Image (cartoon, rainbow, N blue to C red):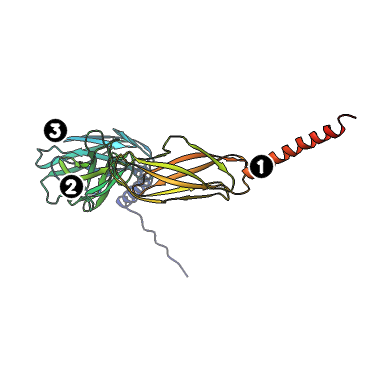
């Protein structure tokens, strides 16, 4: 049995085609890693086109991201005369960022729009570095917008004494379509100390109030010493760019209140025997410019002592007037002779108060003095009898 084997020859053209395909595969495999390793640079912002009021400021949050770590230089172009466009990062004005090749680096672009601006202005931010470049176009349209800013309070007027502190709470409302950066200021009469705080935080110069939201404003006013009874105006102003809003407040000073306590002869001491009552007069003076009402008089005596008053409450003391109160002091029956201190005080509805300390000396009881004298007499009589009876022996 014969077996026949036939052999087909490959044509030269087919051979060349196979070789070309193989060569292309080899080149592709060689160049693919290089293509994959090429650095990428991205420059983005979530809101590239905005509309603002003339005279305000707008901020764009920029993100710079690269596939490998390195420095990326930044530049802004297209700002007309009178406009300012500044890049901020880490609390500084910046012109470049350093990326880590993994996460995006944030940069803020602040654009100040002049009060006479109108129409749309196109800005261009350019990022370049690591052999790559990227541009980002931003559109800012200056246009008068509806909505307003208000500064209101439920209590625009307060009254009290000249030594009181007056606090007002106001609400700053941003009814415009955009976020606004506000500063506040308060002005009072000459000699007054008036301060205004944003969002209830001391030493905060400005705060951003988002569109449609509110912020609290706290105002504190302290009148000068001796302020006379009258009505005093206070003006609070909030500013954001060309926008300005104010609120009028008022403080009514009803007068000053000043209590003092002493004795008619200015002597702050007294004396008496233990267990027996001794009277002590006290003078209470209103040195202010308005009546002081419901003045309560109290005492803090030593333990087991008793102090009472002919009147423990004074209905009213007129300005520059003095009222006398009589206290009855009864030391405890077993009090040892010596000096003790009694604290007297007076307080009023106007939060004005006064104190006075009286030194009270407990004297030796008369009974014991008589007994002591009798004993001395008996001793002398005994000595006389002894000398008379036995003196001649």
Of labels 3 and 2, the one closer to you: 3
Residue pointed to by mark 3? 82
Count neighbours of disc 1 (C-alpha within 10 A) and say few if under 14, some if 14 to 19, many if 20 or more: few
Q: Position of residue 1 (x, y in %)?
A: 47, 70
Left or right of 145? Residue 13 is right
Q: Residue at x 42, y 63 (%)?
A: 5
Residue pointed to by mark 1? 370
Of labels 3 and 1, the one closer to you: 1
Query: Label 3 vs label 2: CA separation?
Result: 20 Å
Query: Label 1 vs label 2: CA separation?
Result: 108 Å
Q: Position of residue 73 (x, y in %)?
A: 29, 34
Quarter holding residue 248 = top left
Dot 3 or dot 2, earlier in sequence: 2
Residue pointed to by mark 2? 49
Residues 243 and 33: in front is 243
Q: Position of residue 393 (x, y in %)?
A: 90, 30
Quarter holding residue 355 = top left
Element type at marker 3? Answer: loop
Residues 52 and 306: in front is 306
Point out the residue furthest to the top here.
392
Query: Label 3 vs label 1: CA separation?
Result: 105 Å
Dot 1 or dot 2, earlier in sequence: 2
């Amino acid at each position: 049995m014969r077996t026949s084997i036939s052999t087909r020859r490959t044509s030269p053209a087919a051979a060349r085609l196979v070789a070309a395909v193989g060569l292309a595969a080899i080149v592709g495999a060689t160049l693919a890693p290089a293509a994959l390793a090429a650095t990428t640079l991205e420059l983005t912002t979530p809101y590239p086109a905005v509309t603002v009021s003339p005279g305000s400021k707008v901020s764009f949050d920029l993100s710079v991201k690269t596939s490998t770590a390195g420095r990326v230089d930044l530049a802004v172009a297209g700002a007309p005369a009178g406009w300012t466009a500044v890049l901020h990062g880490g609390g500084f004005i910046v012109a470049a960022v350093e990326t880590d090749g993994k996460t995006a680096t944030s940069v803020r672009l602040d654009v100040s729009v002049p009060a006479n601006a109108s129409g749309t202005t196109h800005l261009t931010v350019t990022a370049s570095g690591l052999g790559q470049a990227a541009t980002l176009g931003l559109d800012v349209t200056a246009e008068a917008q509806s909505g307003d800013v208000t500064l209101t309070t439920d209590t625009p007027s307060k009254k009290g004494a000249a030594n009181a502190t007056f606090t007002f709470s106001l609400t700053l409302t941003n009814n415009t379509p955009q976020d606004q950066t506000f500063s506040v200021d308060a002005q009072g009469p000459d000699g007054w100390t008036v301060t205004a705080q944003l969002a209830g935080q001391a030493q905060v110069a400005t705060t951003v109030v988002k569109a449609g939201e509110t912020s609290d404003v706290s105002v504190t006013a302290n009148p000068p010493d001796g302020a006379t009874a009258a009505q005093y105006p206070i003006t609070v102003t909030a500013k954001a760019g060309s926008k300005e809003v104010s609120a009028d407040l008022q403080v009514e000073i009803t007068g000053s209140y000043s209590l003092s306590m002493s004795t008619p002869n200015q002597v702050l001491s007294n004396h008496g025997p233990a267990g027996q009552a001794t009277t002590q007069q006290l003078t209470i003076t209103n040195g202010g410019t308005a009546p002081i009402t419901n003045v309560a008089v109290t005492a803090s005596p030593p333990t087991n002592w008793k102090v009472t008053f002919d009147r423990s409450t004074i209905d009213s003391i007129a300005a520059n007037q003095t009222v006398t109160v009589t206290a009855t002091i009864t030391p405890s029956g077993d009090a040892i002779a010596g000096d003790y201190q009694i604290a007297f005080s007076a307080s009023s509805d106007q939060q004005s108060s006064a104190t006075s300390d009286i030194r009270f000396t407990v004297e030796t009881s008369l009974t014991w003095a008589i007994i002591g004298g009798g004993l001395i007499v008996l001793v002398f009589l005994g000595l006389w009898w002894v000398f008379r009876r036995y003196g001649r022996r």
